[in-house]
Image (cartoon, rainbow, N blue to C red):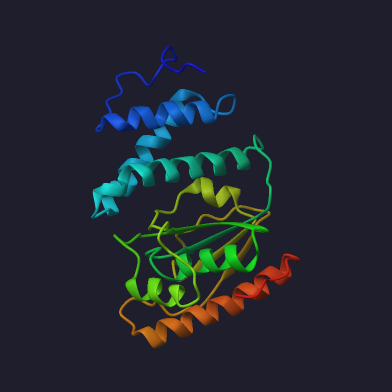
Amino acid sequence: MDVSNRRALPGLAYPEDYLKRLADDLAVRFTGIFSLETVERYVLESYAALLRVSRVKAHLATRTVRFAADRLTALAQAKGAVPYEAHEVLFVCVQNAGRSQMAAVLTATLSGGAVHVRSAGSMPSHELNPAVIAVMEELGLSMSQEFPKPLTDDVVQAADVVVTMGCGDACPIYPGKQYQDWDLTDPDGLDIDEVRQIRDDIADRIRTLLAGLGVSAVAL
């Protein structure tokens, strides 16, 4: 589909030239679901949100398109425009740099792909906790594709289960969803042994969560 002749947002100015190309590519991907105006707005909002928490700008383009695409997919799911292909679980903590990131990667692994996972932070950090990366690598699990993301309404709407971890009332409440609050220690500033214990606690909780969803956990 040629998006060059489609009407963009009036007076829209892109802070970076590549954002227009990202928006055009996503507009093609979401043809028949969202207008170009909606896609552009999501791209710019996602870029601005990540720019505020990114210290390294080298990956900003890649992260922007991933973040915007995931948010648009979540919105499409919530509106019934695209089908749910798996259980949708959202993990929310404060910084999205430790607990929720470990939970997301562990859930994707332990479920064997039977659960689709998102994570977010009420006040996202600039980067992942190095100790968290280290203890996950001990299990052979890479965090190289993960990055802190702000909590947005669309990903909450798309979730079947929302698990919060110390973020208080930041997460909006929607009827018909399962909400759980896990009382977990924040790994920020802790030593590697303490972070390892948090990791194992999360893994045990995830096995229980999966059992409640009727999903058999695979071995790590």
Q: Is residue 88 above or below residue 194?
A: above
Q: Quadrant of residue 160?
A: bottom right
Q: Is residue 47 left or right of residue 206?
A: left
Q: Quadrant of residue 209?
A: bottom right
In front: 70, or 130?
130
Q: Position of residue 68 (x, y in %)?
A: 44, 41
Determine the residue positioned at 31% across, 23% down: 12
Q: Is residue 40 visible?
A: no
Q: Is residue 145 left or right of residue 182?
A: left
- Residue lying at the far front of the rendered structure: 140
Determine the residue positioned at 41% across, 40% down: 65
Q: Position of residue 188 (x, y in %)?
A: 34, 76
- Residue lying at the far top of the rendered structure: 5
Q: Is residue 78 left or right of residue 24?
A: right
Determine the residue positioned at 34% across, 83% down: 190
Q: How many marks?
A: 0
Q: Position of residue 145 (x, y in %)?
A: 42, 56
Q: Position of residue 208 (x, y in %)?
A: 67, 75
